[in-house]
Image (cartoon, rainbow, N blue to C red):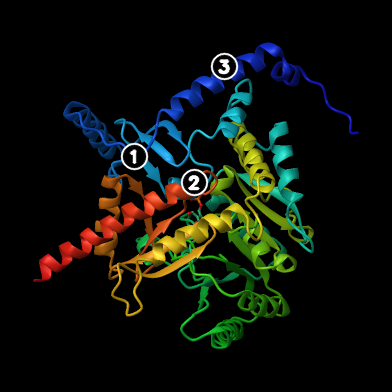
Amino acid sequence: MSFQLQTRSLLLRQSPRFQAAKQEMLSVILESSRMLQGVKSQDSRQVRETYSKLLQEFSRDRGRDLYFPFLASGLGHGSLVELADGSVKYDMITGVGIHFFGHTHPALIEEMIDSLPSDVMQGNLEPGIEMQELLRLILSKVGDQSRLKHGWMVCSGTMANEIALKIIRQKKATATQILAFKDCFAGRSTTMQEITDNPAYRQGQPIYGQVHYLPFYNPEVGLKASIQATQRAMEEHLCRYPGMFACLMIELIQGEGGFHYAPQEFYVEIFQFAKKVGLAIWVDEVQSFGRTGELFAYQKFHLNEFVDVVTLGKMLQACLVLYTEEFNPNPGLVAGTFSGSTVALKTARRVVELLCQDGYLGEGGKIEKKSARFVERLSCLQKKDGSGLIGEIRALGGMIAFVPLSGSMDDVKAVLIKLFDRGVVAFYCGHGPFLIRMLPPLGVLSEDEIDQVCAIITEVLAEQAERKKGVQS
Ligand SMILES: Cc1ncc(COP(=O)(O)O)c(C=O)c1O
Protein backbone atom coordinates (compact mmCIF):
# COMPACT_ATOMS: atom_id res chain seq x y z
CA MET A 1 0.00 0.00 0.00
CA SER A 2 1.39 3.44 -0.89
CA PHE A 3 2.06 6.00 1.82
CA GLN A 4 -0.71 8.65 2.12
CA LEU A 5 0.41 12.23 2.58
CA GLN A 6 -1.34 13.75 5.58
CA THR A 7 -1.98 17.47 5.40
CA ARG A 8 -4.13 19.90 7.28
CA SER A 9 -6.06 20.37 4.03
CA LEU A 10 -6.83 16.65 3.77
CA LEU A 11 -7.75 16.43 7.44
CA LEU A 12 -10.06 19.39 6.98
CA ARG A 13 -11.88 17.72 4.08
CA GLN A 14 -12.12 14.44 5.94
CA SER A 15 -13.28 16.03 9.17
CA PRO A 16 -16.83 15.18 10.34
CA ARG A 17 -17.83 18.87 10.34
CA PHE A 18 -16.68 19.42 6.74
CA GLN A 19 -18.33 16.16 5.65
CA ALA A 20 -21.61 17.07 7.36
CA ALA A 21 -21.59 20.57 5.84
CA LYS A 22 -20.81 19.06 2.44
CA GLN A 23 -23.71 16.61 2.68
CA GLU A 24 -26.02 19.45 3.70
CA MET A 25 -24.84 21.64 0.79
CA LEU A 26 -25.20 18.75 -1.63
CA SER A 27 -28.69 17.88 -0.50
CA VAL A 28 -29.95 21.47 -0.64
CA ILE A 29 -28.44 22.00 -4.10
CA LEU A 30 -29.81 18.73 -5.50
CA GLU A 31 -33.23 19.40 -3.99
CA SER A 32 -33.44 22.67 -5.92
CA SER A 33 -32.03 21.03 -9.03
CA ARG A 34 -34.72 18.33 -8.95
CA MET A 35 -37.39 21.01 -8.96
CA LEU A 36 -36.47 21.67 -12.59
CA GLN A 37 -38.67 19.04 -14.20
CA GLY A 38 -38.98 19.53 -17.92
CA VAL A 39 -39.07 22.40 -20.38
CA LYS A 40 -40.65 25.58 -19.06
CA SER A 41 -41.26 28.94 -20.68
CA GLN A 42 -41.55 32.25 -18.88
CA ASP A 43 -45.10 33.63 -18.99
CA SER A 44 -44.73 36.73 -16.83
CA ARG A 45 -44.48 39.84 -19.00
CA GLN A 46 -42.62 41.70 -16.29
CA VAL A 47 -39.96 38.98 -15.94
CA ARG A 48 -39.59 38.77 -19.72
CA GLU A 49 -39.07 42.53 -19.96
CA THR A 50 -36.48 42.56 -17.17
CA TYR A 51 -34.62 39.66 -18.80
CA SER A 52 -34.76 41.36 -22.15
CA LYS A 53 -33.20 44.50 -20.62
CA LEU A 54 -30.39 42.40 -19.12
CA LEU A 55 -29.72 40.88 -22.52
CA GLN A 56 -29.74 44.28 -24.21
CA GLU A 57 -27.29 45.62 -21.65
CA PHE A 58 -25.04 42.60 -22.12
CA SER A 59 -25.17 42.94 -25.89
CA ARG A 60 -24.28 46.62 -25.60
CA ASP A 61 -21.36 45.83 -23.28
CA ARG A 62 -20.08 43.04 -25.54
CA GLY A 63 -20.56 45.15 -28.63
CA ARG A 64 -22.69 42.50 -30.29
CA ASP A 65 -25.77 40.38 -29.76
CA LEU A 66 -25.73 36.90 -28.31
CA TYR A 67 -26.59 34.15 -30.81
CA PHE A 68 -29.44 33.06 -28.52
CA PRO A 69 -31.14 35.06 -25.73
CA PHE A 70 -29.28 32.80 -23.30
CA LEU A 71 -28.01 33.78 -19.88
CA ALA A 72 -27.74 30.80 -17.52
CA SER A 73 -29.05 31.15 -13.98
CA GLY A 74 -26.38 28.73 -12.67
CA LEU A 75 -28.70 25.83 -11.87
CA GLY A 76 -29.79 22.92 -13.98
CA HIS A 77 -30.95 19.36 -13.71
CA GLY A 78 -29.17 16.86 -15.91
CA SER A 79 -29.88 17.78 -19.51
CA LEU A 80 -32.07 20.70 -18.42
CA VAL A 81 -30.62 24.16 -17.97
CA GLU A 82 -32.32 27.08 -16.24
CA LEU A 83 -31.94 30.52 -17.78
CA ALA A 84 -31.82 33.76 -15.82
CA ASP A 85 -35.49 34.45 -16.67
CA GLY A 86 -36.49 31.19 -14.97
CA SER A 87 -37.26 29.36 -18.22
CA VAL A 88 -35.89 25.82 -18.59
CA LYS A 89 -34.56 24.18 -21.75
CA TYR A 90 -32.97 20.95 -22.97
CA ASP A 91 -29.32 21.75 -23.50
CA MET A 92 -28.18 19.80 -26.56
CA ILE A 93 -25.08 21.87 -27.27
CA THR A 94 -23.77 22.23 -23.68
CA GLY A 95 -21.79 25.43 -24.16
CA VAL A 96 -20.34 23.92 -27.38
CA GLY A 97 -19.37 20.70 -25.71
CA ILE A 98 -18.48 21.58 -22.13
CA HIS A 99 -21.20 19.90 -20.04
CA PHE A 100 -21.16 16.23 -21.08
CA PHE A 101 -22.47 15.36 -17.61
CA GLY A 102 -25.20 17.95 -17.87
CA HIS A 103 -26.00 20.59 -15.28
CA THR A 104 -25.70 20.34 -11.50
CA HIS A 105 -24.31 16.80 -11.61
CA PRO A 106 -24.03 15.43 -8.05
CA ALA A 107 -20.49 14.07 -8.47
CA LEU A 108 -19.21 17.29 -9.99
CA ILE A 109 -20.92 19.44 -7.36
CA GLU A 110 -19.20 17.27 -4.76
CA GLU A 111 -15.82 18.07 -6.35
CA MET A 112 -16.71 21.76 -6.38
CA ILE A 113 -17.52 21.72 -2.68
CA ASP A 114 -14.28 19.85 -1.96
CA SER A 115 -12.32 22.56 -3.74
CA LEU A 116 -13.82 25.35 -1.59
CA PRO A 117 -10.95 25.63 0.88
CA SER A 118 -8.39 25.96 -1.97
CA ASP A 119 -6.95 28.88 -3.89
CA VAL A 120 -9.04 29.72 -6.92
CA MET A 121 -6.42 29.46 -9.68
CA GLN A 122 -3.32 27.35 -10.17
CA GLY A 123 -0.20 27.93 -12.22
CA ASN A 124 3.04 26.32 -13.27
CA LEU A 125 5.34 27.67 -10.58
CA GLU A 126 3.15 26.62 -7.65
CA PRO A 127 0.83 23.88 -8.90
CA GLY A 128 -1.57 22.10 -6.56
CA ILE A 129 -2.01 18.40 -5.91
CA GLU A 130 -5.13 18.47 -8.19
CA MET A 131 -2.92 19.21 -11.21
CA GLN A 132 -0.59 16.33 -10.40
CA GLU A 133 -3.52 13.93 -9.92
CA LEU A 134 -5.23 14.93 -13.16
CA LEU A 135 -2.10 14.65 -15.27
CA ARG A 136 -1.22 11.25 -13.77
CA LEU A 137 -4.74 9.94 -14.41
CA ILE A 138 -4.85 11.12 -18.02
CA LEU A 139 -1.39 9.78 -18.80
CA SER A 140 -2.42 6.41 -17.36
CA LYS A 141 -5.24 6.24 -19.95
CA VAL A 142 -3.36 6.90 -23.20
CA GLY A 143 -3.60 3.22 -24.15
CA ASP A 144 -1.41 0.34 -25.32
CA GLN A 145 1.22 1.23 -27.89
CA SER A 146 0.75 4.94 -27.29
CA ARG A 147 4.03 6.80 -26.91
CA LEU A 148 2.43 9.82 -25.18
CA LYS A 149 4.41 10.37 -22.02
CA HIS A 150 4.19 13.97 -20.80
CA GLY A 151 1.54 16.67 -20.60
CA TRP A 152 1.13 20.40 -20.07
CA MET A 153 -1.98 22.16 -18.79
CA VAL A 154 -3.38 25.40 -20.08
CA CYS A 155 -6.64 27.34 -19.97
CA SER A 156 -8.02 26.91 -23.49
CA GLY A 157 -8.05 24.49 -26.39
CA THR A 158 -6.51 27.17 -28.56
CA MET A 159 -3.58 27.56 -26.17
CA ALA A 160 -3.14 23.78 -26.05
CA ASN A 161 -2.87 23.86 -29.85
CA GLU A 162 -0.40 26.76 -29.72
CA ILE A 163 1.82 24.71 -27.43
CA ALA A 164 1.42 21.63 -29.62
CA LEU A 165 2.71 23.60 -32.58
CA LYS A 166 5.56 25.23 -30.66
CA ILE A 167 6.92 21.97 -29.30
CA ILE A 168 6.71 20.34 -32.71
CA ARG A 169 8.49 23.24 -34.38
CA GLN A 170 11.22 23.24 -31.72
CA LYS A 171 12.01 19.58 -32.32
CA LYS A 172 11.60 19.78 -36.09
CA ALA A 173 13.57 23.02 -36.52
CA THR A 174 14.04 24.44 -39.06
CA ALA A 175 10.90 22.95 -40.61
CA THR A 176 7.94 25.14 -39.65
CA GLN A 177 5.13 24.48 -42.12
CA ILE A 178 1.91 22.65 -41.36
CA LEU A 179 -0.26 20.26 -43.33
CA ALA A 180 -3.89 20.48 -42.25
CA PHE A 181 -7.22 19.35 -43.66
CA LYS A 182 -9.76 21.36 -45.58
CA ASP A 183 -12.57 22.64 -43.30
CA CYS A 184 -10.59 22.05 -40.10
CA PHE A 185 -10.86 24.14 -36.94
CA ALA A 186 -8.00 24.78 -34.50
CA GLY A 187 -9.03 27.93 -32.62
CA ARG A 188 -8.76 31.66 -33.29
CA SER A 189 -5.38 32.90 -32.01
CA THR A 190 -3.13 34.56 -34.56
CA THR A 191 -1.61 31.23 -35.56
CA MET A 192 -4.64 28.99 -35.06
CA GLN A 193 -6.87 31.24 -37.19
CA GLU A 194 -4.46 30.58 -40.01
CA ILE A 195 -4.85 26.81 -39.58
CA THR A 196 -8.65 27.06 -39.14
CA ASP A 197 -9.99 26.77 -42.68
CA ASN A 198 -12.58 29.53 -42.56
CA PRO A 199 -11.86 32.92 -44.15
CA ALA A 200 -14.72 34.55 -42.18
CA TYR A 201 -12.75 33.96 -38.96
CA ARG A 202 -9.62 35.77 -40.10
CA GLN A 203 -10.80 38.98 -41.69
CA GLY A 204 -8.07 41.62 -41.51
CA GLN A 205 -5.56 39.16 -40.08
CA PRO A 206 -2.14 38.46 -41.57
CA ILE A 207 -1.54 35.13 -43.26
CA TYR A 208 2.02 33.86 -42.82
CA GLY A 209 1.77 31.15 -45.48
CA GLN A 210 2.55 28.35 -43.03
CA VAL A 211 -0.52 26.17 -43.61
CA HIS A 212 -1.26 23.97 -46.61
CA TYR A 213 -4.53 22.08 -46.94
CA LEU A 214 -5.28 18.50 -47.87
CA PRO A 215 -8.60 17.04 -48.98
CA PHE A 216 -10.32 15.05 -46.20
CA TYR A 217 -12.00 11.68 -46.72
CA ASN A 218 -14.78 12.02 -49.29
CA PRO A 219 -17.50 9.32 -49.00
CA GLU A 220 -18.72 10.17 -52.50
CA VAL A 221 -15.51 8.96 -54.15
CA GLY A 222 -14.82 6.17 -51.64
CA LEU A 223 -11.88 5.08 -49.55
CA LYS A 224 -9.26 4.28 -52.17
CA ALA A 225 -9.76 7.43 -54.21
CA SER A 226 -9.84 9.54 -51.03
CA ILE A 227 -6.52 8.13 -49.84
CA GLN A 228 -4.99 8.68 -53.29
CA ALA A 229 -6.22 12.29 -53.45
CA THR A 230 -4.90 13.12 -49.98
CA GLN A 231 -1.54 11.44 -50.61
CA ARG A 232 -1.16 13.16 -53.96
CA ALA A 233 -1.81 16.55 -52.33
CA MET A 234 0.72 15.75 -49.60
CA GLU A 235 3.34 14.81 -52.17
CA GLU A 236 2.76 18.00 -54.11
CA HIS A 237 3.14 20.20 -51.03
CA LEU A 238 6.24 18.31 -49.85
CA CYS A 239 7.81 18.62 -53.32
CA ARG A 240 7.07 22.31 -53.52
CA TYR A 241 8.65 23.09 -50.12
CA PRO A 242 11.18 20.32 -49.47
CA GLY A 243 12.33 19.98 -45.85
CA MET A 244 10.00 22.73 -44.66
CA PHE A 245 7.07 20.71 -43.26
CA ALA A 246 7.03 19.97 -39.53
CA CYS A 247 3.72 18.22 -39.00
CA LEU A 248 0.33 16.94 -40.04
CA MET A 249 -2.49 18.37 -37.94
CA ILE A 250 -5.85 16.60 -37.86
CA GLU A 251 -9.20 16.47 -36.08
CA LEU A 252 -10.18 12.80 -36.47
CA ILE A 253 -13.79 13.97 -36.38
CA GLN A 254 -14.03 17.46 -37.77
CA GLY A 255 -16.12 19.49 -35.32
CA GLU A 256 -16.85 22.94 -36.68
CA GLY A 257 -16.27 21.54 -40.19
CA GLY A 258 -19.41 19.36 -40.02
CA PHE A 259 -18.76 16.16 -38.04
CA HIS A 260 -16.94 14.48 -40.93
CA TYR A 261 -14.85 11.45 -40.14
CA ALA A 262 -13.14 8.73 -42.13
CA PRO A 263 -12.82 4.95 -41.96
CA GLN A 264 -9.82 3.78 -39.93
CA GLU A 265 -7.92 2.73 -43.10
CA PHE A 266 -7.86 6.33 -44.30
CA TYR A 267 -6.10 7.53 -41.17
CA VAL A 268 -3.69 4.58 -41.13
CA GLU A 269 -2.59 5.09 -44.74
CA ILE A 270 -2.20 8.84 -44.35
CA PHE A 271 -0.37 8.55 -41.03
CA GLN A 272 1.98 5.87 -42.36
CA PHE A 273 2.83 8.12 -45.26
CA ALA A 274 3.29 11.13 -42.94
CA LYS A 275 5.65 9.13 -40.71
CA LYS A 276 7.63 7.96 -43.72
CA VAL A 277 8.30 11.56 -44.75
CA GLY A 278 9.19 12.62 -41.19
CA LEU A 279 6.10 14.61 -40.17
CA ALA A 280 4.95 14.80 -36.56
CA ILE A 281 1.31 13.73 -36.12
CA TRP A 282 -0.67 16.21 -34.05
CA VAL A 283 -4.26 15.19 -33.27
CA ASP A 284 -6.66 17.89 -32.08
CA GLU A 285 -9.14 16.22 -29.72
CA VAL A 286 -10.36 19.41 -28.09
CA GLN A 287 -13.92 18.64 -29.22
CA SER A 288 -13.84 14.85 -29.65
CA PHE A 289 -12.15 13.78 -26.39
CA GLY A 290 -14.46 11.57 -24.30
CA ARG A 291 -17.24 11.64 -26.83
CA THR A 292 -16.60 8.90 -29.38
CA GLY A 293 -17.17 5.89 -27.15
CA GLU A 294 -13.49 5.71 -26.22
CA LEU A 295 -11.66 8.18 -24.04
CA PHE A 296 -9.43 9.37 -26.87
CA ALA A 297 -10.77 9.45 -30.43
CA TYR A 298 -7.44 8.01 -31.63
CA GLN A 299 -8.28 4.91 -29.55
CA LYS A 300 -11.64 4.60 -31.29
CA PHE A 301 -9.77 4.34 -34.61
CA HIS A 302 -6.91 2.22 -33.20
CA LEU A 303 -4.28 4.82 -34.02
CA ASN A 304 -2.44 4.81 -30.67
CA GLU A 305 1.00 4.15 -32.10
CA PHE A 306 0.95 7.07 -34.55
CA VAL A 307 0.12 10.03 -32.31
CA ASP A 308 3.03 12.30 -31.32
CA VAL A 309 1.01 15.16 -29.85
CA VAL A 310 -2.65 15.40 -28.82
CA THR A 311 -4.66 18.33 -27.49
CA LEU A 312 -7.67 18.08 -25.16
CA GLY A 313 -10.26 20.49 -23.80
CA LYS A 314 -13.97 21.20 -23.55
CA MET A 315 -15.79 18.34 -21.73
CA LEU A 316 -12.67 17.59 -19.71
CA GLN A 317 -13.11 20.98 -17.94
CA ALA A 318 -9.37 21.50 -18.32
CA CYS A 319 -7.14 21.84 -21.38
CA LEU A 320 -3.98 19.86 -22.00
CA VAL A 321 -1.41 18.97 -24.55
CA LEU A 322 0.11 15.49 -24.28
CA TYR A 323 3.31 14.54 -26.10
CA THR A 324 5.92 11.84 -26.51
CA GLU A 325 9.41 11.94 -25.02
CA GLU A 326 10.73 13.19 -28.36
CA PHE A 327 8.57 16.33 -28.19
CA ASN A 328 9.25 17.26 -24.56
CA PRO A 329 10.22 20.93 -25.04
CA ASN A 330 13.36 22.58 -23.74
CA PRO A 331 12.84 24.75 -20.64
CA GLY A 332 11.50 28.21 -21.39
CA LEU A 333 9.42 27.34 -24.44
CA VAL A 334 6.14 26.82 -22.61
CA ALA A 335 4.81 28.38 -19.41
CA GLY A 336 2.08 30.81 -18.42
CA THR A 337 0.56 32.12 -15.22
CA PHE A 338 -2.63 30.06 -15.24
CA SER A 339 -3.01 26.30 -15.74
CA GLY A 340 -6.63 26.15 -14.64
CA SER A 341 -8.83 26.76 -11.62
CA THR A 342 -8.66 24.29 -8.75
CA VAL A 343 -12.33 23.49 -9.23
CA ALA A 344 -11.80 22.79 -12.95
CA LEU A 345 -8.81 20.53 -12.32
CA LYS A 346 -10.66 18.63 -9.61
CA THR A 347 -13.82 18.17 -11.67
CA ALA A 348 -11.72 17.18 -14.71
CA ARG A 349 -10.30 14.26 -12.73
CA ARG A 350 -13.85 13.22 -11.79
CA VAL A 351 -15.06 13.51 -15.39
CA VAL A 352 -12.38 11.03 -16.51
CA GLU A 353 -13.19 8.70 -13.60
CA LEU A 354 -16.92 8.78 -14.39
CA LEU A 355 -16.29 8.10 -18.07
CA CYS A 356 -13.99 5.18 -17.33
CA GLN A 357 -15.91 3.60 -14.46
CA ASP A 358 -19.59 4.00 -15.21
CA GLY A 359 -20.00 1.98 -18.42
CA TYR A 360 -19.87 4.87 -20.90
CA LEU A 361 -17.04 3.56 -23.07
CA GLY A 362 -16.57 0.59 -25.34
CA GLU A 363 -18.84 -1.45 -27.58
CA GLY A 364 -22.35 -1.48 -26.18
CA GLY A 365 -21.39 1.28 -23.72
CA LYS A 366 -23.79 4.07 -22.74
CA ILE A 367 -22.34 6.53 -25.28
CA GLU A 368 -22.81 4.12 -28.18
CA LYS A 369 -26.35 3.17 -27.09
CA LYS A 370 -27.59 6.72 -26.59
CA SER A 371 -26.02 7.85 -29.84
CA ALA A 372 -27.77 4.98 -31.67
CA ARG A 373 -31.10 6.05 -30.13
CA PHE A 374 -30.65 9.59 -31.48
CA VAL A 375 -29.76 8.27 -34.94
CA GLU A 376 -32.73 5.87 -34.93
CA ARG A 377 -35.15 8.67 -34.05
CA LEU A 378 -33.66 11.17 -36.49
CA SER A 379 -33.52 8.70 -39.36
CA CYS A 380 -37.34 8.42 -39.20
CA LEU A 381 -37.32 11.96 -40.63
CA GLN A 382 -35.29 10.99 -43.70
CA LYS A 383 -36.73 9.87 -47.03
CA LYS A 384 -34.91 7.81 -49.65
CA ASP A 385 -35.57 10.38 -52.40
CA GLY A 386 -34.10 13.18 -50.26
CA SER A 387 -37.44 14.91 -49.74
CA GLY A 388 -37.56 14.23 -45.99
CA LEU A 389 -37.37 16.76 -43.19
CA ILE A 390 -33.72 15.96 -42.82
CA GLY A 391 -30.97 14.90 -45.19
CA GLU A 392 -27.70 13.38 -44.12
CA ILE A 393 -27.10 12.40 -40.49
CA ARG A 394 -23.50 12.42 -39.26
CA ALA A 395 -22.99 10.88 -35.87
CA LEU A 396 -20.18 9.36 -33.89
CA GLY A 397 -20.94 8.86 -30.20
CA GLY A 398 -21.79 12.19 -28.64
CA MET A 399 -21.17 14.17 -31.81
CA ILE A 400 -24.50 14.20 -33.64
CA ALA A 401 -25.43 16.44 -36.57
CA PHE A 402 -28.00 16.42 -39.36
CA VAL A 403 -28.84 18.45 -42.42
CA PRO A 404 -32.22 20.13 -41.90
CA LEU A 405 -34.45 20.62 -44.97
CA SER A 406 -32.34 22.20 -47.74
CA GLY A 407 -29.23 22.55 -45.58
CA SER A 408 -29.07 26.29 -46.30
CA MET A 409 -27.91 28.67 -43.57
CA ASP A 410 -31.38 30.29 -43.68
CA ASP A 411 -33.06 26.97 -42.87
CA VAL A 412 -30.53 26.19 -40.16
CA LYS A 413 -30.96 29.57 -38.48
CA ALA A 414 -34.75 29.47 -38.65
CA VAL A 415 -34.81 25.95 -37.18
CA LEU A 416 -32.33 26.81 -34.40
CA ILE A 417 -34.32 29.85 -33.31
CA LYS A 418 -37.60 27.89 -33.31
CA LEU A 419 -35.97 25.01 -31.42
CA PHE A 420 -34.76 27.47 -28.82
CA ASP A 421 -38.28 28.89 -28.42
CA ARG A 422 -39.63 25.35 -27.98
CA GLY A 423 -37.01 24.52 -25.37
CA VAL A 424 -34.12 22.81 -27.20
CA VAL A 425 -30.75 24.53 -27.49
CA ALA A 426 -28.61 23.28 -30.39
CA PHE A 427 -26.10 24.94 -32.75
CA TYR A 428 -24.73 24.54 -36.26
CA CYS A 429 -21.64 23.31 -38.09
CA GLY A 430 -20.48 22.56 -41.63
CA HIS A 431 -19.82 24.76 -44.63
CA GLY A 432 -22.73 24.02 -46.93
CA PRO A 433 -24.70 22.00 -46.52
CA PHE A 434 -24.95 23.42 -43.02
CA LEU A 435 -25.96 21.07 -40.26
CA ILE A 436 -27.71 21.28 -36.93
CA ARG A 437 -25.01 20.33 -34.44
CA MET A 438 -25.56 18.63 -31.10
CA LEU A 439 -22.99 17.85 -28.42
CA PRO A 440 -25.59 16.49 -26.00
CA PRO A 441 -25.01 15.68 -22.35
CA LEU A 442 -24.89 11.93 -22.99
CA GLY A 443 -23.49 11.50 -19.50
CA VAL A 444 -26.98 12.10 -18.10
CA LEU A 445 -29.48 12.15 -20.97
CA SER A 446 -32.10 9.38 -20.69
CA GLU A 447 -33.65 7.56 -23.65
CA ASP A 448 -37.00 9.20 -22.86
CA GLU A 449 -35.38 12.60 -23.02
CA ILE A 450 -33.79 11.74 -26.37
CA ASP A 451 -37.28 10.87 -27.64
CA GLN A 452 -38.70 14.14 -26.28
CA VAL A 453 -35.93 16.20 -27.87
CA CYS A 454 -36.41 14.40 -31.19
CA ALA A 455 -40.18 14.99 -31.00
CA ILE A 456 -39.57 18.74 -30.61
CA ILE A 457 -37.07 18.65 -33.51
CA THR A 458 -39.70 16.89 -35.66
CA GLU A 459 -42.40 19.48 -34.89
CA VAL A 460 -40.11 22.41 -35.61
CA LEU A 461 -38.85 20.94 -38.89
CA ALA A 462 -42.40 20.15 -40.04
CA GLU A 463 -43.49 23.72 -39.30
CA GLN A 464 -40.51 25.19 -41.09
CA ALA A 465 -41.20 22.97 -44.11
CA GLU A 466 -44.84 24.16 -44.13
CA ARG A 467 -43.78 27.79 -43.81
CA LYS A 468 -41.46 27.42 -46.78
CA LYS A 469 -44.24 25.84 -48.85
CA GLY A 470 -46.49 28.79 -47.93
CA VAL A 471 -43.85 31.31 -49.05
CA GLN A 472 -43.26 29.49 -52.35
CA SER A 473 -46.94 29.15 -53.30
C1 LIG B 1 -11.28 20.99 -32.64
C2 LIG B 1 -11.10 22.24 -31.84
N1 LIG B 1 -9.86 22.71 -31.62
C3 LIG B 1 -9.65 23.82 -30.91
C4 LIG B 1 -10.68 24.53 -30.36
C5 LIG B 1 -10.42 25.77 -29.57
O1 LIG B 1 -10.69 25.54 -28.22
P1 LIG B 1 -11.03 26.76 -27.24
O2 LIG B 1 -12.31 27.35 -27.73
O3 LIG B 1 -11.13 26.13 -25.88
O4 LIG B 1 -9.89 27.71 -27.33
C6 LIG B 1 -12.00 24.09 -30.56
C7 LIG B 1 -13.14 24.85 -30.03
O5 LIG B 1 -14.25 24.75 -30.47
C8 LIG B 1 -12.21 22.91 -31.31
O6 LIG B 1 -13.43 22.44 -31.55
Q: Quadrant of the N terminus?
A: top right
User: Which residue is disc 1 drawn over?
Assistant: 39
Left or right: 188 in relation to 136:
left
Confirm or reject: label 2 Cβ below 8 Å from ligand 1. Answer: no
Asked whether the beta carbons under mark 1 and mark 2 sit within 8 Å of each other, the answer is no
- The residue positioned 64% from the left and 47% from the top of the image is 355
Judged by depth in the image, the label closer to the viewer, 3 or 2, is 2
Q: Earlier in the sequence, mark 1 or mark 2?
A: 1
Residue at 25% across / 51% down in the picture? 418
Nearer-N-terminus badge (3/2): 3
Residue 309 in which image quadrant:
bottom right
Q: Is residue 114 above or below residue 299?
A: above
Quadrant of the frame with the C terminus: bottom left
Q: Amino acid at mark 1?
A: Val
Secondary element under disc 2, as helix, strand or loop, is loop
Q: Which residue is mark 2?
A: 445
Neighbourhood count class around disc 2 (C-alpha, 10 Å): few under 14, some 14–19, many 20 upward: many
**For residue 95, what is the image quadrant?**
top left
Percent position of residue 180, x then y: 54, 71
Q: Is residue 55 left or right of residue 153?
A: left
The amino acid on which the numbered mark 2 sits, given as a three-letter code, is: Leu
Would you say residue 5 is visible in this rendering?
Answer: yes
Structural distance between the alpha carbons of marks 1 and 2: 14 Å
> What residue is at 62 percent from the left and 30 percent from the top?
111
- Say the numbered circle drawn on residue 421: none
Query: What residue lies at 50% left-to-right and 43% top-to-bottom?
Result: 99
The amino acid beneath tag 3 is Glu
> Any mark on residue 24, and which?
3
Q: Secondary structure at mark 3?
A: helix
> Which type of secondary structure does the marked residue at label 1 adopt?
loop
User: Looking at this view, is 445 or 431 the one in front?
Assistant: 445
| Quarter assignment of residue 367 | bottom right
